Image: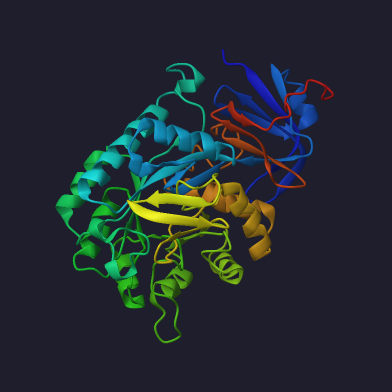
Amino acid sequence: MDSTLLIAGGTVISTSGMSADTGVLVRGSRIVGTGPTRDMLMRSPDSIMDARGAFVAPGFIDIHIHGAAGSDTMDATPSALARMAEFVSSHGVTGFLPTVMSSPIEQMLAATRAAAQAARVDAQPHNACSRHGRTQAGAQILGINVEGPFLNPEFKGAQPEEGIASPDPAILKRILEAGGGHVRVMTIAPEMPGAVDIVRELAAQGVLASVGHSGASYDDIQSAIEAGLRHVTHTYNGMRGLHHRQPGVVGAALVHSELTCEVIADGIHVHPAAVKLVARAKGLGGTVLMTDAMRAAGLPDGHYELGGQHVIVTSGAARLDTGVLAGSTLTADAAVRNMVEFAGIPLYAAISMASSTPARLIGLSGRKGRIEPEMDADIVLLDAETLQVRATLVMGEAVYERKQDNRDRSVDR
């Protein structure tokens, strides 16, 4: 029988608030109980993790991340994905979608296949082998995000133009087949000829169709919503902006309740006031914190690569030689801290934007994104004063712990 772990004495964060001096009891890979710490101690756990002075929150789910720690999804190797998984877990991420960017189709297919294979391994039943079926430390790969290739070249941003293609059902079929059922999100410019049919097919396949790198009009977005469009890729960036006579993609994103909105809360891609506007317009259920991070995340300023393009990182801002922003160096925990500051919202709301909301969007709300009995034990401990990550648990396993030891049997029984 699996051993039990009690995360004791912390303030547990839910989608509606916080509960102080609360224990979270974990058996194997699942949460089996929550309640006052004293009551949980009566259940005689096998071990205790001292969470006093910490917020105990559902692990973050980053649904849009290209790379980190020197690696990129487009490297298309198990080692690159493993390095990304290990790095992001140190910033509170328990699950993520490696994001494939627009590239020549064979490169996209290779990256998609590599990510699909990693997702298959991470999806194995928890009793299949050691570490609850997982072969590596770090965050789980929960699926794949494909950003392209059916984009508008006029709004390409840092997407290589040679990788952008006209909407083509045959190309879509090849990408989805390479994903083996693990493609969760795809970005498309719905104004391109034939794009609405692609949106309709994505919706039929259970893939979240997202507008991005798009010059669509407000009416274009309305038509795409009717076909199944449900999401907005890095709101404001790489799209037609808001004008009072031409609301464009941004205007449609803010007013249509059918659409959830990603936002890069780094203070570089989006002004803090514009971040606040998204949070107010969409709420915690309609706003998604993600990073759009590239391989320089976690590394010093310097020279890097994205999609075969030279990138210069200065003061944390990643740009192509043309000056165009090229992904970010943002981490998920920093995004949460920034959202609290920029939008003036409660911590629990910002954490929901990084956990329960993305879990719902990718069809995993029944297992992930909340600290409740029967949910996967994907948990992050945040220092109550600094909101820095103290520990990260994935499927009940501590995959990251800050240098001090959080396990403390001195908690009063």
Q: Nearer the viewer, residue 29 or 326?
A: 326
Instruction: Name the residue: 42% across, 29% down.
Output: 122
Quadrant location of the C terminus? Answer: top right
Viewer can see residue 327: no
Q: Nearer the viewer, residue 7 or 322?
A: 322
Against 27, residue 96 (above or below) is below
Viewer can see residue 178: yes
- What x and y, as percent, mark residue 193? 19, 68
Quadrant in the picture for residue 337: bottom right
- What x and y, as percent, mark residue 218? 36, 76
Seen in the image, is 212 located left or right of residue 193?
Answer: right
Number of numbered discs on residues: 0
Q: Nearer the viewer, residue 293 or 42?
A: 293
Instruction: Name the residue: 34% across, 61% down.
Output: 229
Seen in the image, is 200 located left or right of residue 270?
Answer: left
- What x and y, as percent, mark residue 18? 72, 47
Instruction: Name the residue: 23% across, 58% down.
Output: 162
